Amino acid sequence: MMDWKELSRPNRNALQRLYGGGSLRNCEPVVISRLRQLGLIEGKDGREQLSHVGWALMDYTHAQLKARLGADTRRASGSEHREVA
């Protein structure tokens, strides 16, 4: 599977828009073309949507982010927690 970090920022922004329920209405045609070429989106004429591969990438990336943020939160709260006597 493709890694999130391999995508350019405009490509990532476009995928995030679709993942959040938005559209690619004002997106550059070259970005849409590249995402379609990679198999991450399907559809045309302003009705682009995430493909199965696109959904899998976004779900995987979202789960990684949640896990990383959860670990960072636990670490930060553990180091700042002090018992009050």
Image: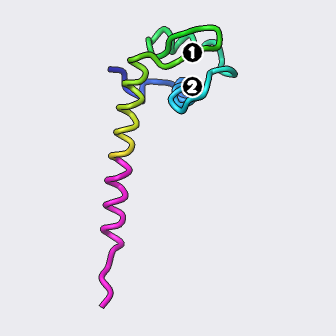
Q: Is residue 7 magenta?
A: no
The residue that disc 2 covers is 14
Q: What amino acid type should be assigned to the residue bearing mark 2?
A: Ala
- Identify whether 7 is placed above or below 79: above
- Identify whether 9 is placed above or below 48: below
What x and y, as percent, mark residue 23?
Answer: 62, 23
**Of label 2 and label 1, which has the lower sequence position?**
2
Colour pattern: rainbow
- Between 16 and 7, the one lying in front of the other is 16
- Identify whether 51 is placed above or below 5: above
- Quadrant showing the C terminus: bottom left
Residue 80 found in image quarter = bottom left
**Element on which disc 1 rests:** loop
Q: What amino acid type should be assigned to the residue bearing mark 1?
A: Glu
Per the rendered image, the range of residues in magenta is 68-85
Q: Which mark is residue 48?
A: 1
Instruction: Look at 30% across and 67% down and name the residue there.
Output: 78
| Cα distance between the residues tagged 2 and 1 | 10 Å
Instruction: Look at 36% across and 21% down and name the residue there.
Output: 2
**Element on which disc 2 rests:** helix
- Between 16 and 4, the one lying in front of the other is 16
